[in-house]
Image (spheres, helix red, strand yellow):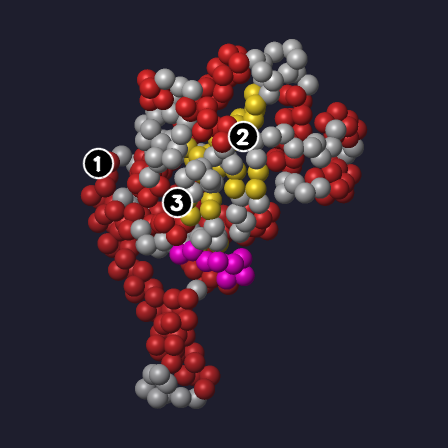
Amino acid sequence: TEAHEKVYEAPEDAQKVISLVETLNDESLLQIEHKLLKSHPNTYTFTKHLAEHEVIKCIDMFPCTIVRPTMIVASWKEPIPGWTCSKVGPQGFLMGAAKGVVRRLPLAKEKVADYIPVDVVINQLLVAGWEAAKSKSGLTVYHCSSSTCNPFTWTMLDNTVNNMLHKYPLKSAVWYPHLKFVPTLLMFRISAIFVHFFPAFLLDLMLRVTGGRPILIRLHKNVWNSLNRLERFIFSEWKFYNPNTLELATKLSKKDKELFYIDVTSLQWVEYFSTLHLGVRRYLNKEKESSLPAARNKDMVLLVFHVIWQLFIMGLLWYVFAWQTGLTLATSAWIAPIIYVLYNLL
C-alpha cells in the first residue's frame, strides 16, 4: 500500500459523523461502524483523515500544514538516545521479550515497517510550522516517515535481537528471553499455546500460591484478541513517500540541520534498536546500569532452568508417545530427535 503527500478524498463528512456520535447510542454506532469506516482499518486512521479536511477549511484564515508521522518510536538523539515513555509498538514487545514473557512475534519480517523516532517528529512539527508561516503558499502535506528513504525490515534484527536481549538483560525477567518471529497468525496461535499460555498458567499458579497477583494469562489473552485488529498492519507493507520532507530538510541552514534534524537517511537501524532496548530497560523497566551484573547472573540461572524445562517437556512427550504406542523408551528413541525438531519449530 502506498501513500503520498497529499490530502485524499474524505471518506465521510466530519460534521455528519459528529452528529451521529452525539445522537446514536454505542450499540447503534457499532452496527454502522463498518459502513462508515469504508477502507479504513480502524477509527483512529478514519478520524485522522476527517481531521485533515477540517484543517483545509482554515487555509484561508492562517498558514496551515499537515505532518503525518508513521509509527512513532523511541528517540534517536534527543533528549537522550533511546528515551521512551510508551509501551506501544516495538518498545512494548521488546519489553515483554526481555522479561521472557513474549517469546513469539507474528510479523512479515521481510516487509518494510515504517518507524520514525519521536524526536524527529517533534523537529518536523517545528520546521513545518516555520515553513508554513514563511511561505504562506497554501497547504503542504509532509510524511514524517522512513519507509522510502531509509527502509527498515525485521530481517535486519533476525540474527541479533536475542544477542541484544542477553547483552542487556533485565533483573526483573521472569524467564529466559528468546524471541522468535513467526510468519503467520496461525503459526503464532499454535506456538502461543505451548510457549505463552502453558508457561503463563504455571507462573500465574505460582503467583497465586505465593500471594502475588496473576497477570500473565490475562496479558496473553489481550494480545491474542488484539491480533485480529492488527493483522492488516502486521502483515502489510505500507510505503509513505516523503519528497516534501526531504526537500524541506534542504531548506535548513547547516546549524539548523543539526538542531532540527528531520532527514533519517543516516539512521543506522541495528545500532538504533540496540539503543532502544537500553532505553526500554532504563525508562520503561526503571532498571539502573548498576543492576546489569546482577541481571546477567540471573540470566545465566534462567538459562539453566530453561534448558531443564525444555528437556522435561521433550522427555514427557517422548514418554507419552512410548506409552501410547506400547514401545519402550529404548525402542522409541528414534522419536526423540523428531520431537526436538518439531518443538523448536513452534
Q: Position of residue 129 (x, y in %)?
A: 50, 17
Amino acid under disc 1: Ser
CA gap, disc 2 and disc 1: 39 Å
10 Å crowding of disc 3: few (<14), some (14-19), many (20+):
many
Point out residue 284 in the picture as x, y percentages from the top left corner: 38, 35
In this rendered view, identify the residue nearer to me: 118 or 146. Answer: 146
Disc 3: which residue: 94
Which badge, 2 or 1, is on the more N-terminal residue? Answer: 2
Q: In the displayed structure, does residue 23 sit left or right of residue 72?
A: right
**Span colored in magenta:** 180-189
Compared with residue 127, is residue 322 higher up or lower down, i.e. above or below?
A: below
Q: Amino acid at mark 3?
A: Leu
Based on the picture, tell me whether residue 184 belongs to the magenta stretch: yes
For the residue marked with disc 2, what is the amino acid?
Answer: Arg
**Mark 1 falls on what kind of element?**
helix
Q: CA distance from mark 3 to mark 1?
A: 21 Å
The picture places residue 323, in percent across and down from the top left corner, at: 43, 83
How far separated are the C-alphas under marks 3 and 2? 25 Å
Answer few, some or many: residues within 10 Å of disc 2's Cα (few below 14, many 20 plus, some between 14 and 19). Answer: some
Q: Which residue is mark 1?
A: 290
